[in-house]
Every structure is written in structure tokens, then in C-alpha cells.
Amino acid sequence: MQTGSDGVRRAEVAVAAALAGARVILQARAAGGPGESAGSPPIAAEDKGASGDYVTEVDRASERAVVELLRAETGLPTVGEEEGGDRAEQYWVVDPLDGTTNFVHGLPIVGVSVALVERGRPVVGVVHAPFLGDTWVGARGAGAERRWDGGSEALRVASRDPERAVVGTGTPFRHKEVLPLYLAMFGAALERFEDLRRPGAASLDLAWTAAGVFDGFFELGLSAWDVAAGGLLIEEAGGVVTDWSGGPDYLSGDILAGPPAVHAELLRLAAGS
């Protein structure tokens, strides 16, 4: 990333906060074992409402670690998935454990997502994958990069043609009322693109799209903490991120994202679904 801006400095605070949350997750997994199927004590999960929408004490503890650091370093308000909070002209939005179902089942596809939103638009975004060791970080106007132990590289969206594209998605299991719309889009996308993927953690799907691993992403019914950081990463990596009507309000949770050519196809398919 380009250095020297206030956004870059706040991005480093967000990195530190995401790593603080990740330490909680890693410690909990080490104490709880690799999952119920391995015979170790499972991570206790509560259902938040919709079937399969889980929360654990690990989610809450990770959020406390992230929020405490952000407040101490910046004094800005925070909005977290588990504890809520108040939005303002500038505020942090936090998903402390994206992919809780994966975590409960011992699947290591989980993320910690931290974004700074200013006047309704993400300006800093960090996604960290505790079990994979990758951190994706970006600041508006300063670019974005992937970091790992001992290295870093700039993020750039893929340039594959749409017919060769592998596109990430996630099912709107919390919002069954939009399933007909989603399933129509799913079928059209599967016909148009080479293949689809559903790993189960939107923040990582978006980070992988920014890095060119995936060629795009679409989902309905997410929340701002799922998409704010990853959306910023894609924009800084040369991609396009919108809601399903092509507007800028992807923090609503209805999101289409990818390189310009793939995003254009996603938007066309969404209009016909």
C-alpha cells in the first residue's frame, strides 16, 4: 500500500485489532480441539434465531478484544455483529468470527473482518484468516495487499474472461423469503460462468476476489460487517462492488462484486433473475 496517509495509519490499527481477535479464536480452538468429529470437547454454540445462524462465546470474546483495541487507539464508535453499537459519521464495523458454523464444525475457513466506515462508505478494510495465516489490508486511495508471515503482495482482481470465471457465493439461509430470487441467480450464474464456490465466510470470499483467487462474488441478505472490509479491498484492487441494482449501497448486504467484466455479467444476471 502507499504509505503516509491517515487511512494507512488506521489500517494498521485495524490489522492489530483483527490479530487480537484472531488470537482469541486460535486459543479457543487449541483448548477445544479440532471439532466434535475428532472426539475433542466441541465448541458450544447457541442459535441466534435462524436455523444455522450460530454464535459462540468465542465470537463474543473475539469481538471484545477487537473493540477494546479500536476504542483505545482511535476513540471512534464501533458496531459489532454480536454486541451492536451506534453508527456515526465515522465508525468501525466488526465481524469478530465470520464463518461461525465452519468454526463449530472444525472447518478452518473463518475470518475476522474490521472496517472503518466514513459517511456511509468503507475507507479502511482488513480481513484476517486465523487458521490460514493470511491478512488482507487496504485503505481507500492507497491500494490493498495480502500479507503473510515474511511477505506481502499487492492485490489485483483477476482478468479471466467471464466464461472461465469461478465465482464465490453464499446462500441466504437467514432470509428464506429471497430464496426464489437467489436460486434464479444461482442457476443463471452456473450457466454463465465456469463454476461457483460456497466456502461459508463472506469476508474471505471477498478477500479472495480482491486477490484474484475468485473471479467474483454475489450474495443476498448479508450485513454490513460481512461486506464492508472485503468490499473496500476489491475496490482498491481494481474491481467493482455494488448492490443488486447496481447502486453503491452494498453495505445493505445485497452485494455483487468482481472485476469489471464479471461484475457487468453479475449485474445483467441479477436484473433477469
Image (tube, rainbow, N blue to C red):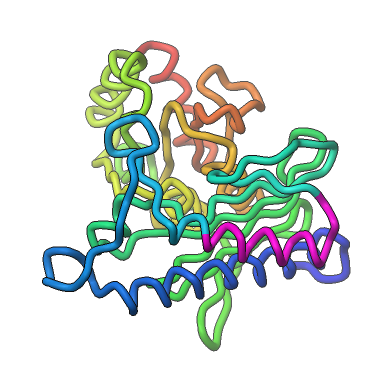
Q: Is residue 194 above or below residue 16?
A: above
All told, the count of numbered labels is 0
Magenta region includes residue 70: yes
Q: Position of residue 225 (x, y in %)?
A: 57, 43
Q: Position of residue 53 (x, y in %)?
A: 35, 39
Residue 167, can we see it?
Answer: no
In the rendered structure, the answer to whether residue 180 lies left or right of residue 207 reads left
Magenta region includes residue 170: no
Q: Nearer the viewer, residue 41 or 11?
A: 41
Q: Nearer the viewer, residue 53 or 112?
A: 53
Magenta residues: mostly which secondary structure?
helix
Q: Is residue 239 above or below residue 249?
A: below
Residue shown at 46% from the left, 51% from the top: 209
The range drawn in magenta is: 61-76
Determine the residue located farthest toward the bottom in the rendered image: 150
Residue shown at 33% from the left, 78% from the top: 31
Q: Nearer the viewer, residue 129 or 53?
A: 53
Residue 171, can we see it?
Answer: yes
Q: Position of residue 149 (x, y in %)?
A: 51, 85
Image quadrant where one finds the C terminus: top left
Quarter of the image holding residue 250?
A: top right
Residue shown at 39% from the left, 59% from the top: 110
Quarter of the image holding residue 194?
A: top left
